[in-house]
Image: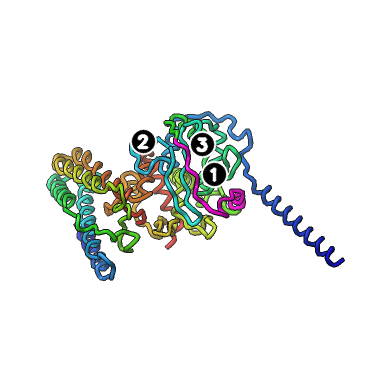
């Protein structure tokens, strides 16, 4: 639990730091990065069980999967104004390709919702069901990051 | 008389210059392996598949958005911008004309360990022969056999978009003389697992090609091995993956190379996501070996 608390505090501190910077679209960028962090935290709860670092707990897994689906399904459309890409704003790791012709960022976001829906249906049903549904969510994260997020950490 | 002396001096200088240039071109000419280098090696395509995924061939030569079986369609086309121009990954599919279907194992060995094409031209070091030069010839022979099993793609390779003077490939011989160094970077007593990790990181997986910073001429700075640096397009940074910066456990590293998840459940982005799609196909012990090696690399802050 301490680890989660620490991660929340760290994320909050980082967001506060970003908000102070006088960059365009700071609010939007903070919000979308905060949503990403929120998803990552839920993935972390389930990931620890998948990796065997934490004992499987149906209730905790279900709670995390519910929260993940809620965060995956959020309407983020107002958070992606043109000009808030990684070329324009240092704080952003969102590649300009998101806004370019032929961008399929919308269908990749839908793929995440689908995978998170399946995970939400499976997470409370035992460790094997959790494991099977966890991988596709990771793949959905990765597929979008591969195309649309700057690679450096 | 004065004029004739000057003329003679000028002529001698020109001649000396021409001889000098000829010597440099001769010394740095594209050179392949000895003809008998592969004698006695028997190809095993199944082993070659492990070499293929460890070598990350598909990360550059397949389409960036390829998934599943499409990863074996090695038609090239991915673009790599750099200060020297934009390089375009060529077709290395099994097509006899557009790809490398006609290549012998020796052709592949010369390409990977010497950076020399079957026609005897230098390759640009964007093709990581500087790392592949450390691979075993057995692995290359096995890889050749595996590459003969992937589909043919008849789409011709696109030319690199590189301007003068970097479009003069003869100059690459000089680059090789300065920088091509197939000695191990990490030396000393290593466990078998760490040695396997070293082989994967320093040779096949060619991690240092991005994670080690380069000097003004594009040579790797071995004294900053895996310490990260700016990306060639100047828009970002490759992370430092020495213990001076990367504090993940070995299990964390292995997990990242399998699922793409960091310990914080962020996931790999950009080209590293492509790399992970390759390392995910390796045996689990190989991912652990990479992690074990990374813990042994000299820490750089």
Q: Which of marks 2 and 3 is nearer the N terminus?
A: 2
The reply to whether residue A51 is visible in this rendering is no
**Which region of the structure is painted magenta?**
B155-176
- Who's the residue at 23% across and 62% down the image? A30
Within-10-Å neighbours for mark 2: few <14, some 14–19, many 20+: few
Seen in the picture, residue B90 relative to B247 is either above or below; the reply is: above
* Residue A124 marker: none
Q: Quadrant of residue B78?
A: top left
In the image: residue A63, left or right of residue B196:
left
| Mark pair 2, 3: CA separation | 22 Å
Classify 10 Å Cα crowding around label 1: few (below 14), some (14-19), many (20 and above): many
Q: Which chain letter matches label 3?
A: B
Asked if residue B169 lies in the magenta stretch, the reply is yes
For residue A122, say whether it is visible. Answer: yes
The picture quadrant where one finds residue A26 is bottom left
Q: Mark 1 points at which residue?
A: B133
Of the numbered discs in the image, which one, if any, rests on residue B140?
A: 3
**Image vertical order of residue B48 relative to residue B256, above or below:** above
Q: Which mark is residue B70?
A: 2
Q: Mark 3 and 1 residues: CB-CB less than 8 Å, in contact?
A: no
Coloured how? rainbow
Locate residue B56, reporting x and y percent.
43, 42
Instruction: Assign a secondary structure to mark 2.
Output: helix
């Amino acid at each position: 639990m301490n680890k989660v608390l620490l991660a929340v505090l760290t994320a909050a501190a980082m967001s506060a730091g970003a908000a102070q910077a006088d960059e365009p679209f700071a609010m939007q960028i903070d919000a979308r990065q905060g949503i990403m962090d929120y998803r990552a935290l839920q993935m972390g709860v389930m990931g620890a069980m998948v990796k065997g670092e934490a004992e499987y707990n149906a209730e905790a897994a279900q709670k995390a999967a519910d929260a993940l689906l809620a965060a995956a399904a959020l309407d983020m459309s107002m958070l992606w104004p043109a000009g808030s890409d990684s070329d324009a704003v240092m704080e952003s790791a969102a590649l300009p390709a998101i806004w370019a012709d032929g961008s399929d960022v919308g269908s990749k976001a839908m793929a995440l919702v689908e995978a998170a829906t399946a995970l939400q249906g499976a997470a409370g049903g035992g460790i094997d069901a959790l494991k099977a549904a966890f991988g596709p969510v990771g793949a959905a994260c990765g597929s979008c990051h591969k195309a649309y997020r700057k690679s450096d950490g | 008389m004065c004029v004739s002396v000057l003329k003679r001096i000028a002529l001698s200088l020109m001649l000396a210059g021409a001889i000098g240039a000829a010597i440099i071109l001769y010394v740095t000419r594209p050179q392949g392996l000895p003809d008998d280098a592969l004698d006695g090696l028997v190809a095993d395509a199944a082993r070659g598949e492990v070499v293929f995924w460890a070598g990350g061939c598909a990360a550059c030569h397949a389409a960036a958005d390829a998934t599943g079986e499409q990863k074996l369609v090695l038609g090239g086309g991915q673009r790599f911008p750099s200060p020297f121009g934009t390089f375009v990954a060529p077709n290395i599919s099994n097509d006899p004309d557009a790809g490398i279907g006609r290549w012998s194992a020796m052709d592949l060995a010369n390409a990977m360990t010497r950076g020399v094409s079957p026609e005897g031209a230098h390759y640009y070091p964007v093709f990581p022969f500087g790392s592949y030069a450390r691979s075993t010839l057995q692995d290359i022979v096995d890889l050749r056999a595996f590459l003969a099993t992937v589909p043919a793609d008849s789409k011709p390779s696109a030319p690199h978009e590189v301007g003068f003077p970097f479009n003069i490939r003869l100059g690459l011989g000089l680059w090789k003389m300065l920088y091509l160094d197939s000695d191990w970077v990490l030396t000393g007593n290593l466990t078998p697992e760490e040695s396997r990790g070293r082989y994967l990181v320093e040779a096949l997986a060619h991690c240092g090609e991005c994670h080690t910073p380069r000097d003004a001429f594009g040579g790797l700075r071995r004294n900053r091995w895996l310490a990260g640096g700016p990306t060639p397009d100047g828009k970002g940074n490759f992370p430092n993956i020495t213990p001076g910066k990367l504090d993940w456990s070995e299990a964390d590293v292995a997990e990242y190379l399998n699922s793409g998840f960091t310990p914080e459940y962020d996931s790999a982005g950009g080209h590293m996501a492509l790399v992970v799609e390759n390392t995910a196909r390796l045996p689990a012990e190989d991912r652990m070996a990479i992690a074990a090696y990374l813990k042994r690399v000299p820490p750089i802050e």
